[in-house]
Amino acid sequence: MGEPLHNYVGTVGAIETLTASWGVDFSHRRITVSTVGLVPEMQRLLAETQAQLAVSLTSVHERTRSELMPITKKYSVAQLLAACRALPLPRRKRITFEYVLLAGINDRVDDARALARALAGIRCKVNLIPFNPFPGSTLRRSDDVTVARFQDVVRRAGVHATVRESRGPDIAAACGQLVAAEERRARRESRRAADADVTADIDAAMSS
């Protein structure tokens, strides 16, 4: 959970353990590091490891991405994409751009066209991810027709695009739902603890 490149040393150590013959012995091709776009660490990761890189993009419009992903205030969309263009990708390796589709926010045809234009010249593929709604969220999932249309527009522009199959939303176990469920549980326990403290104070006051 969280941004792996905020713990760069730990992430690289984990990759080494997973891919070493004395460790789990996975192929480097099976290891993908997903980041919100910490530019210096991305560059360092590709220079020091053979891991695959996935960048959570979600919008190529500065204002929209800033609202959805605060990291944009530090590394603008232009800076992020320029860094991706300059990354020393080995032959046959591509960057994966992860794009969470949110109804009425970033799923329009114009958004798809803007995405394809922004990625022109970058060796990449796009992983379209329909949003997994959860209680308390004001964001909505794009419907299947909208997702298919978005994918078609991106593909027609010459950018490879796939749609990630969501698994586990029926039990709130899909991507983005587990942490929300855990946060709600923690808030409930905190409220119960606070209520218990108040009750104890009242009982103590009445008995004194």
Image (cartoon, grey):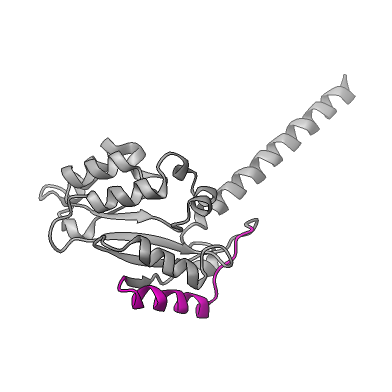
Q: State the residue at coordinates (28%, 40%).
A: 41
The one nearer the camera, 186 or 86, is 86
Residue range in magenta is 138-159
Q: State the residue at coordinates (53%, 54%).
A: 64
Q: Residue furthest left?
A: 21
Query: Is 45 left, or right, of 73 in this rendering?
Result: left
Query: Is 169 left, or right, of 17 in this rendering?
Result: right
The mark total stands at: 0
The one nearer the camera, 52 or 112, is 112
Judge whether residue 90 can be spotted in this image. yes
- Residue 11 at x, y percent in the picture: 28, 42
The one nearer the camera, 45 or 192, is 45
- Residue 151 at x, y percent in the picture: 41, 75
- Residue 124 at x, y percent in the picture: 27, 63
- Residue 179 at x, y percent in the picture: 51, 51
Within the image, what quadrant is residue 4 found in? top left
Q: Is residue 61 above or below residue 117?
A: above
If the image is split into quadrants, where does the C terminus sit? top right
Magenta residue check for 177? no
Judge whether residue 34 can be spotted in this image. no
Magenta residue check for 155? yes
Within the image, what quadrant is residue 103 found in? bottom right
Q: State the residue at coordinates (51%, 48%).
A: 66
Query: Is 87 left, or right, of 148 in this rendering?
Result: left
Q: Is residue 37 above or below residue 200?
A: below
Q: State the residue at coordinates (24%, 62%).
A: 123
